[in-house]
Amino acid sequence: MDEEQSNSRRSFIKTGLITGAIAAGGLGIMEVASQDTSKKKGDTVKLLSPDGKIVEVDSSEINPQIPDSLISTHNVREGVPGKKFVMVIDLAKCKNAGRCKSACSKMHYLPETRSYIKINKMQDSDKASPYWMPTPCFHCDNPPCVKVCPVGATFKLTDGIVGIDNDRCIGCRFCMVACPYSARVFNWDTEYQINVVRFKEIKEHAACSTHVTGTVEKCDFCPTKAAKNELPDCVQACPNGVFYFGDENEDVVSNGDETVRLSQLLKDKSGYRFLEDLGTKPRVYYLPPVDRQFPFKDVEPGTT
Amino acid sequence: MEPIKIKLDKSNELLTDLMPRKFGPQGRLWVGFLLLVIIIGAVAYYRQLKHGLVVTDMRDFTSWGIYISNFVFFVAISLVGSLVSAILKLTNVAWRTPLVRISEIIAVAAITFAAIIIIVDMGRPDRFWHLFVYGRIQSPILWDVIVITTYFVVSCLLLYIPLLPDIAVCRDTAPASPRWKKRFYTFLALNWKGTSKQYAIIHKSINVLAVLVVPLALGIHTVTSWLFATTYRAGWDSSNFGPYFVAGAFQAGCAGVIAVTFVLRNHYNLRKYITNKHFDNLGKLLVLLSLIYLYFNINEYLVPGYKMKTVDGEHLHSLFRGSYAPLFWSVQIFGMILPIIVLLFKKGRKPLPIFIVSILVVVGAWFKRFLIVIPTLLHPFIPIQNVPESWHHYVPTWEEWAITSASLAGALLIITIFVRLFPIISIWETTEEKMNATATQTGDQTQFYGA
Amino acid sequence: MAILGSFFMLNIHNAIAQDSTHNSSAKIALDFVTQDSINQVKATVTNPDANGKDTAVKGADVHFFIKKSFGLLPIGDAVSTDDNGEALAEFPMDIPGDQSGNVTVIAKIEDNEQVGNLETSKVTNWAVPTKTDHGDPKRALWASADNAPIPLVVTVTSIVALVWGTIFYILFQLAAIKKAGKLENA
């Protein structure tokens, strides 16, 4: 691990010398990207691809166009008006296929080894069968992370999402220790920024995590997509329909194939929230791992 | 009240004994050593600024490491200022006089580096100003920023105000050259002439500050404990944490002041002023504080240990019998049990044994904070999985050790420089005490202490 | 398309969609009827005969949906059209709509032998109006800095004021010491 990191660091420095712009590193992608906005089409910029090669891309490729008028018309610290986003995860259907993780990594320009979703092997007692439990950020309604943030860098939107402002975060990591679900990850070094080859879709929404060295990030419920009534990438990518996403105000959630009443689903399948007794009021519900669709196999994700 | 007259000629043995002296070879070697440690720490911090916190061994699960435990240690040590200059004052403990200034400079040095080390821990130190622009009063970190700043200011005042008459002595006895020295003392002495009005003001100010600093000291360490206790984590989720931290802080601080006092007493030959009786009293105080801390430790470990709730149980198991057991039991035995046993005996309260015991307590206190911060983070509610093997452990890197050592060296350097510039035992208060002793003999009951 | 457009203009309540690949003139229309205080969604499926007269389509399976942000919520199972070409489904009374209780209902026929694919949609105000709280954001520990709980703000402010008031008093005393020394000089 250490060696890998120092390697990527070295190549980072090398690449940084070439691009100049990126070498400003640690100061946020957007500043870099916006510098490139002025460049005409046809100019090329050298960047480091996720597999460690230096690639040349057209500068128009990294022009962060913000096409979505919906995003700019409301305050990003207030969320999408009238919405209360909610997720339901059906543990009976999860077989640790790992697609949610890889889709998440892709959506958020994370290295393959890293994603905001974790698929945890859980076993409630010795005699019970183990099961897989995917954990995104729970976007709690009584969020311990937001409570402790000293600068309001993580905040609760009216649409239920717990957002992060990576330009404000001071990197104290109090939110990480406050979160009982270990949902938060930290940009320990510059590794993650340089994996961004295409900046195009990143940070259309300020609540969207961006990879700024020395700051915290986490699952953001893909607010850019949610605002456009599109399901988050993990929901769409899951081959087994484990994830349901929707709007609590509408009382409807969908996993892409099937659209159901939220209240009915939770009633019929005894939906629950993880560690309910902590009182954090998560916006992510679980359906218990009963009547499993797959036998439990302890395998690496992606091999099934 | 009569103003205190301090004779400024050679006949006053207080001046020859207590005035600051130039560093000898030993002193220069010591300062050189401290500077070397600080320089290495600065190099490590440069690397951390350049590469990010990746140079540490902190990762997503152990997201706080020895910077934070070192911070807690510094805050703990700093409480000694309030203990000696306020609590012992308000309870009319007369023997505290030669120890007041030592404990107050320890407090100032420790709280200064507590503030510095917390900035070192930040992922984005360049955004420190966000705390003032975007500060959320709901966050315990903001409470800590407020209370640390306040405690720092009050500690500086508690150091500075009782120092005024002695600064004036330095000013009045300083040779004509170098001129900066005379100017320096003149500037700091605030026209001190030793009039009864001036003495009245400083006595009143010290009394006000002594009352003010006690709740502040309790506040600073209680708020620091809340950085942990306001979370859900196993081992931190405890309503016992405030008093537990405060008790530990007084114990550590008392040991700190004993250790520093011992070194200064030997180095500057202060046996006349800091007697075996002082060490005997400090020893008794340390036993009392250790017993209180033992009581809180029993509360802190026995109660959850009795229940063994799932994650609490895993955490406690790692401390009692698991990978942290050697460190845990060393700290509990050498940092708490052994001091209690040794110091209960009169022979144990002689200067040398008490010095050794105090060093054990201080080192134990440092590692105790390590044990409070790190093992908890390795036992989250959802077991750590799907991460590189190294993320399951926390072994501080050389950069972390270097920066931490530099902060400790920095605190010691502040104390060293202070001793070089100012009398470490109050000349005017010692004079005053002597006057009172004479007055008492002649039947005058005037008492300044505890007045 | 022109015919379709004018038809839509005339029958503002009957939105129509057609599947041109199969039977270009088959129609599906949606109506909302209340019978015995039960709200029902009615789809009428017609197909023009040789004379161009609309005749009812029997036995076509109609699926009813309510349009939601992230998908179409089915209303019960598919219903076959009767002799009048009508299919009825009960409208769920407790479904939330927008602020005025409006929802869009969709009726769909898929891969039918007679009419192919048909779809239409229509808005009704039968749903439960959703209250969106546009009031002041709640004061809470997790709220923004501006919305900190009042008791917390009052407590912290008064403690800080008290302590720093004392500190400034002491600083003032320091000034007094300096002044007292100056007077002595004079």
Image (cartoon, coloured by chain):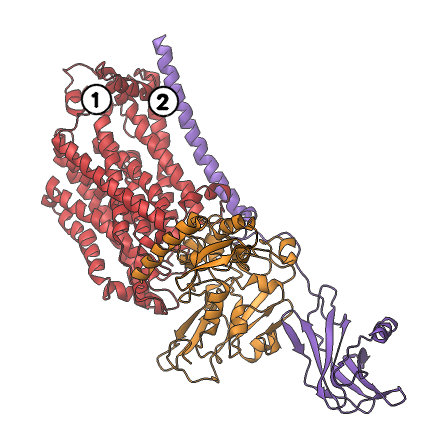
What is the CA distance from the residue labelled 2 to the residue labelled 1? Answer: 18 Å
Report the quarter where the N terminus of chain B lies.
top left
Q: Looking at this view, name the residue that lies furthest to the top.
A: C186
Q: Which mark is residue B431?
A: 1
Type of amino acid at the residue the image marks with label 1: Thr
Of the pair A291 and A41, the residue shown nearer to us = A41
Type of amino acid at the residue the image marks with label 2: Ile
Mark 1 nearby-residue class (10 Å; few <14, some 14–19, many ≥20): some
Left/right placement of residue A149 relative to residue B16 reads right
Q: Is residue A103 visible?
A: yes
Q: Colour of chain B?
A: red
Q: Is residue A262 above or below residue B224?
A: below
Q: Looking at this view, name the residue that lies furthest to the left.
A: B347
Report the quarter where the C terminus of chain B lies.
top left
User: Which residue is rendered at x = 40% and y = 26% of the image?
Assistant: C171
Mark 2 nearby-residue class (10 Å; few <14, some 14–19, many ≥20): some
Output the chain of dot 1.
B
User: Which residue is rendered at x = 18% and y = 40% of the image?
Assistant: B259
Q: Colour of chain C?
A: purple
Q: Colour of chain A?
A: orange
Residue A11 screen position, x and y as percent: 36, 56
- Secondary element at tag 1: helix
Q: If you read the primary sequence from the N terminus, does the residue marked by circle 2 or circle 1 appear first?
A: 2
User: Which residue is rendered at x = 33% and y = 20% of the image?
Assistant: B187
Q: Which residue is mark 2?
A: B201
Of the pair B179 and B271, the residue shown nearer to us = B179
Q: Is residue A237 above or below residue A71?
A: below
Of the pair B395 and B301, the residue shown nearer to us = B395
